[in-house]
Amino acid sequence: MSADMSAETSAENAPGNGPGTSPEPESVVDAAAAAAVAPTSAVAAEARDDLAQVEPVVGAPKPDAILVADDVVRRFGGMTAVDVTHLEVQRGAITALIGPNGAGKTTFFNLLTGFDTPQSGTWSFEGRSLHGKSGARVAQQGMVRTFQLTKALSRLTVLQNMLLAAPKNPGERFWLSWLPFTWKAHEKAATDKAMELLARFKLDDKAGDFAGSLSGGQRKLLEMARALMTDPTMIMLDEPMAGVNPALVQSLLGHVQALRDEGMTVLFVEHDMHAVRHISDWVVVMAEGRIVAEGPPRAVMQDQAVVDAYLGAHHDTDLGDDSLLDPEILARLEAEEEKR
Amino acid sequence: MDEFLRILTQSLAEIIAPTTAAFAIAAIGLNLHFGYTGLLNMGQAGFMLLGAYGFGIATIAGFPFYLALLVALAAGLLFALILGIPTLQLRGDYLAIVTISAAEIIRWIGRSTWLQEWTGGASGLQGRNYKGTFQDLSPLPDGRTVIGPLEYINTGSDSWWTRIFAWGLVALALLFVWLITRSPWGRVLKGIREDEDAVRALGKNVYSYKLQSLMLGGMLGALGGVVYVLPLTIAPDAMGRTMTFFTWTVLLLGGAATVFGPVLGAMVFFGAYMLMRTGMRALAENTGVGDIITTTNVEQIGGMLVGITLMLLVIFRPQGILGNKKELAFDVR
Ligand SMILES: Nc1ncnc2c1ncn2[C@@H]1O[C@H](COP(=O)(O)OP(=O)(O)O)[C@@H](O)[C@H]1O
Ligand SMILES: [Mg+2]
């Protein structure tokens, strides 16, 4: 994990426009997306090639699935929040999970990561069943998540937030806690790693500040950096860009791609369609608890079922269409929706 | 003037009294619960009473001093396990409800007649039955010692030896808590205090840490209970809700999540409490105030003022004397 993975550097080195990007980057998001189109690592390139072979149908099997979920159902009272028949997530790729508010994305995340228990269903990570495993156990196995409502540990400093996430610290055992010589070396190494990660997220000059003093966007970044401290195999981000200012979004997208290029698997929930279109290798769409479509970003966003789920029926708009950024057009769509 | 000096001396004596040390130790334990881990233990007096019973009953059964002390610690540990195992998986408020009722149950069992043979029922255990082994340990020569305005016998119930031992234990408890909380282990506790789901998401077994915190703080509570009864008797009704309430006041006054807060809090609280009561009594006896505050009302008014102090503290200075104001400036949900 070196500093040259940061978005800026890769932006400078970007070899023009790869396949599937708009020719002229217009927004910050587009610029960032254009920055790292082609995966640089072998794992990521292979994942992308693999995905190119996959048929874009719901429940499609993936050549190298790291996460597999079957018949996962979660009901709250009479309401079915999640009902996923079959989903596979490709290793080494960025998969976006999209869907309107209330579609069940967060609930599905909670179920997969052991923070909630479904009424039925099985799911496995790297071939091992995670059914009935606690949130802590799931994280220990290498699947680490962040939260939609950011959970910065306010009265700990930014650096302490990071150090807390370091795995296998001997000083976290009570019996060794009062003997600093047993954990000083580990702590030192963790501090170096933490500072490197913080620098990557431009939080290094905040290391000594209380996390509670950070802005909402900075907390999102801290939470992501903190998750990375655990050396995850797969990272699950619940709306990582929400509330982050546009200038930071650009580098954040770069970071997410850098993670993939290092071989990490990323599953993220996001509402910003441009971010989704540009950085994800695969898109899964949820609506009313079910998966209604999946496939490569461009194809999915033109899918009628997806457009219906987002914008209501009878629209031929493509979700990746830049005109959707225009407030006037959005207002018109909303008005139409209300009239129906 | 003499009257004034007498009042000051009494307050000074209260500051270094063994019972003040007992509350300091119990508050150090409560600090581990609440200040560091965010656990709402509303029954620290239950831990103290169990510790006192454990020590007293073991001593009366013929155990040597240090073994009896271990019995007291084991009682605190066991109580923490019984309360913690079922409740620490639930939301925080449940622990508060369970601890407050469990402490009351211990007190009611203690004062009932079923176990009277061991606990002495409502009248409790007389000091002379369990203080022997402790006083035999005293290295001090016979006689009395005067230090400044304070004079006590060297060895006995209300003695220098009791004070040395009690404050020695306070120092040990402080050292212990300081050592363990400045470590990565302590950092996990603080993380749990801030947001346990976040800590869980980082792969830490939150339940196990909360249980460890409850056990350690509970054992300190039990130790405080032993110190509390060394100069007194073991009377269940003296170790009830008021005791828990005082322990909380001590902790919040000194500053939760600070190392010295509980000790400073205990000294300031009991010093001021004594000053207030003796002062009011003197005023009632010697001035016209006596018409409003009669000497018989002093205790009640004192208790009331403690309650008001606790409320004002929580509202206007939640960080206590030693706490960091900046730290509390963030809205912690
Ligand atoms: N703890 C809960 N109790 C009851 N209903 C819930 C709970 N959590 C989520 N829901 C409901 O489940 C549905 C899916 O919510 P959520 O997973 O948060 O959606 P998304 O993240 O896709 O916006 C919503 O209708 C929400 O109201
Ligand atoms: Mg959500």
Image: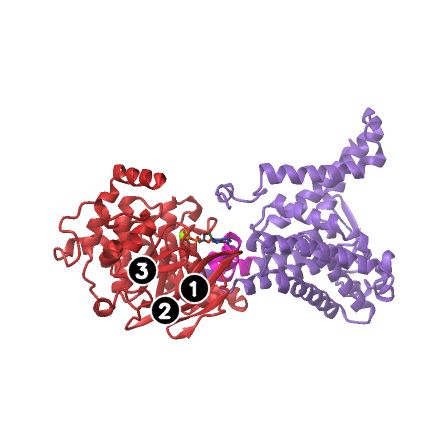
Chain colours: A red, B purple
Quarter of the image that includes the N terminus of chain A: bottom left
Q: Mark 2 highlights which residue? A: A67
Is residue B226 placed above or below A330 in the rendered structure?
below
Could you say whether the residue bearing mark 1 is in a helix, strand or loop? helix
Is residue A230 placed above or below B153 in the rendered structure?
below
Residue B165 visible within the image:
no
Determine crowd level at label 2: few under 14, some 14-19, many 20+ residues with C-alpha closer than 10 A.
Answer: many
Instruction: Provide the chain ID for the residue under circle 2.
Output: A
Q: Earlier in the sequence, mark 3 or mark 1?
A: 1
Which residue is at the front of the view, B3 or B330?
B330
Asked if labels 1 and 2 share a chain, the reply is yes
**Does the segment drawn in magenta span residue B189?**
yes
Is residue A188 placed above or below B306 in the rendered structure?
below
Quarter of the image that includes the C terminus of chain A: top left
Q: Mark 1 highlights which residue? A: A112
Question: How far is disc 1 from disc 2 in space, using C-alphas?
Answer: 9 Å
Which residue is at the front of the view, A150 or B144?
A150
Which residue is at the front of the view, B14 or A191?
A191
Q: Mark 3 highlights which residue? A: A293
Residue A12 at x, y percent in the picture:
16, 53
Q: Position of B143 compared to A32: left or right?
A: right
Residue B187 at x, y percent in the picture:
49, 58
- Are the residues tagged 1 and 2 within 8 Å (C-beta)? yes
Stretch in magenta:
B178-199
